[in-house]
Amino acid sequence: DSGVTQTPKHLITATGQRVTLRCSPRSGDLSVYWYQQSLDQGLQFLIQYYNGEERAKGNILERFSAQQFPDLHSELNLSSLELGDSALYFCASSATSGYNEQFFGPGTRLTVL
Amino acid sequence: QKEVEQDPGPLSVPEGAIVSLNCTYSNSAFQYFMWYRQYSRKGPELLMYTYSSGNKEDGRFTAQVDKSSKYISLFIRDSQPSDSATYLCAMGVGGSYIPTFGRGTSLIVHP
């Protein structure tokens, strides 16, 4: 158990809908990362937050947004969902924004029908 | 061409075999290299991290980096069924703490 929790485990929704994925980092970790994992693209970095501030952005679509709250939990919002958004979404946390091992949560499996 | 190439497998070996997992990369600026293990329905976990060319050993695992060939390997000695998982290589540029991941190789170790 990495200490990172993600909810929900599974999410099934329809095209055009909006969903929110939630992540609680390990106790004491200030940095949260969001990744998308699909069979054809592998693990793709989406966005990083450090202590409430956006720190780095990757291949995140404009339809997706994220935030980190004062208690350090983070939410990833996905809107106007398309079939191609079906994937595993992972959250990871690390102690700082610099190099530290990233600890991954168990993921949320999103299925868009 | 992707920055990091990794054969998805699956690679099936008998218990006790030596396993070799490999990645090639195109970005010569990559300075640090990692291997993650991902069990089915779990998140990736870091196995090995190295910053330089050469070998790094940790128990049954050896990570090898050849920067001149842009090629990294992970060797698993005396493989066990519990090693069955997907292995992802990852690498990054110094100063950037967001690595680029390979697609992962699925390893099956059968008793």
Image (tube, coloured by chain):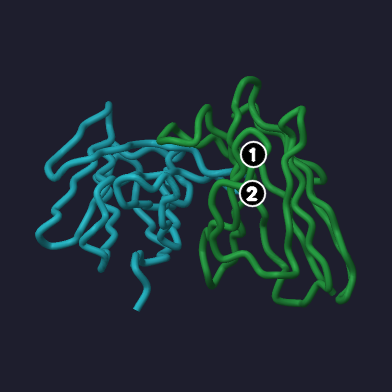
Chain colours: A green, B cyan
User: Label 2 marks which chain's residue?
Assistant: A
In this rendering, the count of numbered labels is: 2
Marks 2 and 1 in Cβ contact (< 8 Å): yes
**Badge 1: residue crowd in 10 Å (few <14, some 14–19, many ≥20):** many
In the image, residue B74 sits, relative to residue B12, either above or below, namely above
Question: Where residue A6 sits: x, y (%)?
Answer: 74, 40
Query: Do discs 2 and 1 share a chain?
Result: yes
Which amino acid is tagged 2?
Phe
Of the residues under marks 2 and 1, which one precedes in the sequence? 2
In this view, the residue in front, A86 or A50, is: A50
Question: Where residue A21 sits: x, y (%)?
Answer: 79, 50
Residue B47 appears in which quarter of the rendering?
Answer: top left
Q: Which residue is mark 2?
A: A90
**Badge 2: residue crowd in 10 Å (few <14, some 14–19, many ≥20):** many
In the image, residue A101 sits, relative to residue A48, either above or below, namely above
Q: Which of the labelled discs sits on residue B73, or is there none?
A: none
Q: Residue at x 45, y 49 (%)?
A: B98
In the image, residue A79 sits, relative to residue A74, either above or below, namely below
Which amino acid is tagged 1?
Gly
Q: CA distance from mark 2 to mark 1?
A: 6 Å
Question: Where residue B100 sits: x, y (%)?
Answer: 41, 57
Q: Which residue is mark 1?
A: A105
User: Label 1 marks which chain's residue?
Assistant: A
Q: Residue at x 61, y 59 (%)?
A: A36
**From the viewer's perspective, is B32 left or right of A21?**
left
State the residue lying farthest toward the top.
A28
**From the viewer's perspective, is A75 left or right of A100?**
right
Question: Where residue B24 sits: x, y (%)?
Answer: 26, 64
In this view, the residue in front, B108 or A41, is: A41
SS type, badge 2? strand
In this view, the residue in front, B51 or B20, is: B51
